[in-house]
Amino acid sequence: MKRMLSLRDQRLKEKDRLKPKKKQKKDPSALKEREVPQHPSCLFFQYNTQLGPPYHILVDTNFINFSIKAKLDLVQSMMDCLYAKCIPCITDCVMAEIEKLGQKYRVALRIAKDPRFERLPCTHKGTYADDCLVQRVTQHKCYIVATVDRDLKRRIRKIPGVPIMYISNHRYNIERMPDDYGAPRF
């Protein structure tokens, strides 16, 4: 008899354990906590305050190649687009990518080795230029990215406060640049 009770008690305890616990009603007057992504302080106003002349422009491999095809002088065309002094910057990854392209792109390599271009050393492993540019722009929002690559443009558009320079109609245009800086809208 005692044993019977104990089996019955055990079953009751199991049922109690399996019952879902009732949710407590939340107090509507209580403060709600939300997870909000932290934006850098340079984006306090509607645009990136770290951008300003002289502009530092990160140049991608295909941007140099398409500039050669369009017969555009890189530095001069950048200045014509932004109405200010421009410092083109090339990372070690982009330089390695141009060197890998071989003899056919020797003009692009010669342009990339121009003394007016600033060389930026890379500390990461591998030589994939797109990842390198995205990583650098995410860390330091003081760059404009010059590229014609659709995938890279799509990745950079997700980063707030980073303008993109591209080629259209045989001239350079800028995307996502604040009006305050005087960049033309076409």
Image (tube, helix red, strand yellow):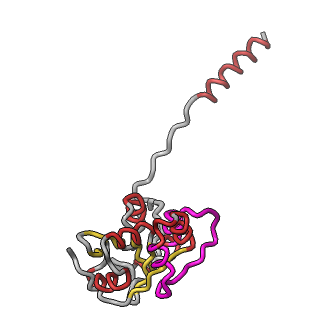
Where is residue 152? Give x, y as percent.
42, 62
Looking at the rendered image, the quarter that the N terminus falls into is top right
Residue 12 image-quadrant placement: top right
Q: Residue shown at 48%/60% (left/top)?
A: 35
Task: Point out the residue furthest to the right here.
Answer: 2
Quarter of the C terminus within the rendering? bottom left
Residue 160 image point, x, y percent = 40, 69
Instruction: In this rendered view, identify the residue nearer to me: 96 or 6.
Output: 96
Residue 20 shown left or right of residue 146 in the figure? right
Residue 82 position, x and y percent, is 31, 84
> Is 132 inside the magenta-drawn segment?
yes
Q: Which residues are magenta?
A: 107-136
Please state if 122 lies on the left or on the right of 87 as rendered: right
Residue at the limit of the structure toward the top, as seen here: 1
Tell me the residue at 62%/24% (across/down).
15
The image position of residue 24, as x and y in percent, is 50, 45
Q: Nearer the viewer, residue 136 or 168?
A: 168
**Magenta stretch encompasses residue 73:** no
What residue is drawn where x is 51% and y is 68%?
98
Specify whether 183 is left or right of 92: left
- Which residue is drawn at the image coordinates 71% and 21% (left, top)? 10
Residue 71's image quarter? bottom left
- Is residue 89 left or right of 181 when viewed as pictured? right
Front position in the image: 100 or 40: 100
